Image (spheres, rainbow, N blue to C red):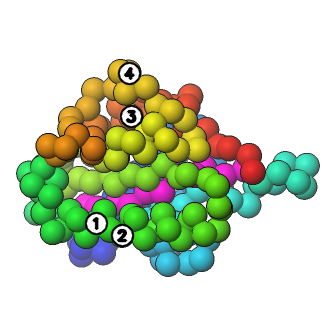
Amino acid sequence: MSNKDRGKYFENYVVANIKTYLNLKNRDIYRSSTSGNYSKEYGDITFSTAAKINDEVITIYPWIIECKFQKNWSMSMMFSHSKEFQSHWLELEQQTEKYIKNYPGIIPLKSLIISKPYEKVWIIFKKENLIDNSISKFDLNKLEYFIVNNNKNMIITELKQFLFTFSSELCSIKI
């Protein structure tokens, strides 16, 4: 299996988990075919922005997700802020800038989901973004997490635990 195929497999795995925990349909979330390069795709996983209610209200999930599935990944990469980890986070920031241009006033939840074969799937956030975003002000006391670096601004937790803990809060917003 090539690196590209492994990446697609992992992105599909993440989509399936999010769909299950949030009770979404296929049309609500999908793996971005162009990894966020299309004008209405943000990150590796895209939430539908086309759902209309009464022909007036558009429902969106303001959540940007970048996925990385690499054999050589290690937890120490995050704690040491390696160049590779920083480049992954920079990708996420670029997708966020694009999102904010299209949806001014909406603060998306942004996350990096990372794993390697036969290991747990981890989700990484900036701590302040979990508290200040347009979806929810997540109560971190409900969640087991690790602090990624010394200045305590990034946290990591298992993807399934995050989805299970906050499934009722991870809802769409109406714009």
Rounded to the nearest whole Å, what is the CA distance between mark 1 and mark 3?
A: 20 Å
Q: Position of residue 111 (x, y in %)?
A: 39, 52
The secondary element bearing badge 3 is classed as: helix
* Quarter of the figure with residue 143: top left
Front in this rendered view, residue 55 or 174: 174
Q: Position of residue 60 (x, y in %)?
A: 66, 52
Cβ atoms at labels 4 and 3 below 8 Å apart? no
Earlier-in-chain disc, 2 versus 3 = 2
Rounded to the nearest whole Å, what is the CA distance between mark 2 and mark 3?
A: 22 Å
Q: Relative to 48, say whether 36 is above or below.
A: below
Question: Any mark on residue 91, and which?
Answer: 2
Most distant residue in the front direction: 151
Instruction: Tell me the residue at 23%/65% (across/down).
Output: 86
Q: Relative to 166, say whether 106 is above or below.
A: below
Cβ atoms at labels 2 and 3 below 8 Å apart? no
Identify the residue under disc 4: 142
Badge 2 crowding class, 10 Å Cα cut-off, few under 14, some 14 to 19, many 20 or more, is some
Q: Amino acid at mark 4?
A: Lys
Q: Amino acid at mark 3?
A: Phe
The segment highlighted magenta reads 59-69
Badge 1 crowding class, 10 Å Cα cut-off, few under 14, some 14 to 19, many 20 or more, is some
Cβ atoms at labels 1 and 2 below 8 Å apart? yes
